Amino acid sequence: MIFNSKKYSEETEKNRIASSSDPSTFNMISLGLLATFAPSRWILRLRKLSVDNFATINPILQKQCPIIYIHGFRGGAYTTQVMVDEVCKLKHDSHYLRVIMDLSGKVTFEGEWTSDKHPIIQLVFRQRIIGKKGINYYLSRLLPLLKSQFHFDNYYAVAHSLGAPAIIDTQMRYAKNAKFPQLKKVALIAGPFNGVTYLGDIPNVNIMGEKGYPLAMNLTYLHFLHQRKRFSSHIQVLNIYGNILDETNTDKFISVVSAKSIRYILAPQLDYYQEVEVRGAMAEHSQMHDEPFVINIINHFLGLK
């Protein structure tokens, strides 16, 4: 068995509306590869970020802590849209900021930066065929830009799929970098922290040891394990993962063992760590982020309900 990329793209992009302005597959893969490997990232950094600001920026009247929504591999606005819409309903304000970044260095602001305590930021990565390290690169460019532009020091994050290990890794890497805002709360949804099904992980082969760690660890997991002390104990973490209750013990693409494995790394040193296993039809990898049950748990965690 191998990872079924066609099936994954069909399910992940089921709500995507194609546009003539979308980058080509060649563009997404080639720039994505440049962002993935550290020796080639300098090529992308040759171009400074340029911002096209089409957003309404309201006055900043108080200390703000935005909530940033992050999608994963083959994701987009369609991945986080339902969550964003629901949190806007709770705030009784339909406005939010959409930040679109192209790996060529172009950043576009759309929508509105609100003046309340928790402005909403929806990130969209134009080259969406990209892995964890590529998403790390996006975040390494965007987070300092957003901090500089909107003058906030802390933020909350909601991250789906490969966006989940990417935000953990980004926080570990830049924990002491004053140019970066600091993570205070993070909700992780369907995160592959120790492999993807049939891409570094095989259902029901890897298991948790008696002490709570996976018996087989990939390089990403070992990196997290080595860098765990760089993750502040004051960050609150909610980890949500799925089990569709078939014989695989997965959400179709991420095993329970892989998604749950981050607990061993983070939970012992955190003041707050909570995990939720979603089961049944609503636990499918690309369905969880739209489920009212899951969204309700996340919004409670963020302190919005």
Image: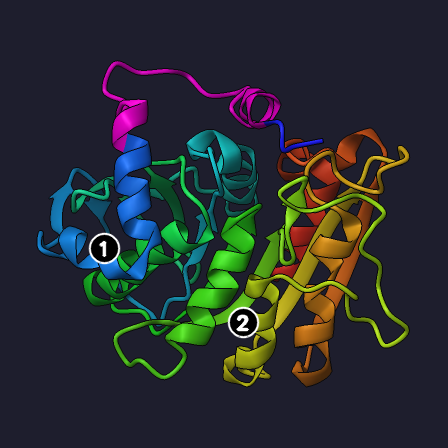
Q: Residues within 10 Å of mark 1 (few under 14, many from 20)?
A: few
Residue highlighted by disc 2: 223
In this rendering, position of residue 62 left or right of residue 220: left
Viewer-proximal residue, 213 or 115?
Answer: 213
Q: Is residue 91 magenta?
A: no
Residue 123 in percent (x, y) is at 37, 45
Q: Quadrant of the N terminus?
A: top right
Q: Amino acid at mark 1?
A: Ser
Residue 45 is situated, as x and y percent measured from the top left of the image, at 15, 57
Relative to 272, say whether 206 is above or below. above
Q: Quadrant of the rendered structure where residue 97 is?
A: top left
**Residue 121 visible somewhere in the drawing:** yes
User: Nearest the camera: 135 or 188?
Assistant: 135
In the foreground, 97 or 14 = 14
* Residue 294 percent location from the top left of the image: 71, 44
The image shows residue 121, relative to residue 236, as above or below, that is: above
Left of 291 or right of it: where is 24?
left
Disc 1/disc 2 C-alpha distance (Å) = 21 Å
- The residue shown at (67%, 36%) is 285
Residue 142 x, y percent position in the rendering? 28, 56
Residue under numbered circle 1: 40
Report the residue at 46% width, 52% height from top.
132
Which element carries disc 1, helix, strand or loop? helix
- Counting residues from the start of the chain, the first of labels 1 and 2 encountered is 1
Q: Which residues are magenta?
A: 5-27
Tag 2: amino acid = His
